[in-house]
Amino acid sequence: MSSLPNPAQLLAAMPFAARLGIELHEAAAERTEGSLEWSPDACTVGGALHGGALMALADSVGAVCAYLNLPEGASGTSTVESKTNFLRAVTAGRVRATARPLHLGGTLVVVQTDLRDDRDRLVGQTTQTQIVLRKHDR
């Protein structure tokens, strides 16, 4: 990919992520970072940030990382598998997601995204597989 879109352009392409309040801070092929602020309307029992909100953060940031690593001739990417381990509850503050590629293939891109709280504690880890889309796939 010759010129990389900036984080704002990438986030604009994901209206659901923007609706949730996800912010994209850094977007590079080797590392993509975004965050989500805790809010009471995104919680489950006991004021813990809902796992679905955390997974949406990881999926969104991981998808940008996968997109920035697409091989020549690819037109896009889509999540085909995602697995998250939740390690602790988030009850306040901001969650930071940092995604890095694990595998860059012609058909699949695998990305690992670490989720950390304001105290830099690991709160979750997501491994997702993204399929490489070509124009004839759409």
Image (spheres, rainbow, N blue to C red):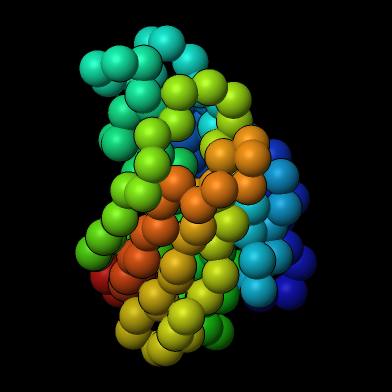
Q: Relative to 4, is 134 on the left or the right?
A: left
Q: Quadrant of residue 131?
A: bottom left
At x 45%, y 23%, the residue is 91
| In the depicted structure, whether residue 130 falls above or below residue 27 | below
Q: Quadrant of residue 24?
A: top right
- Place of residue 9 in the rendered image (x, y in percent of width and height, measured from the top left): 66, 43
Report the quarter where the C terminus lies. bottom left
| Tally of marks | 0
Report the quarter where the N terminus lies. bottom right
- Place of residue 65 in the rendered image (x, y in percent of width and height, measured from the top left): 55, 64
Asked whether 98 or 131 is in front, the reply is: 98
- Place of residue 47 in the rendered image (x, y in percent of width and height, measured from the top left): 36, 16
Asked whether 7 or 41 is in front, the reply is: 41
At x 44%, y 70%, the residue is 111
- Place of residue 102 in the rendered image (x, y in percent of width and height, measured from the top left): 47, 80
Q: Is residue 109 visible?
A: yes
Name the residue furthest top. 40
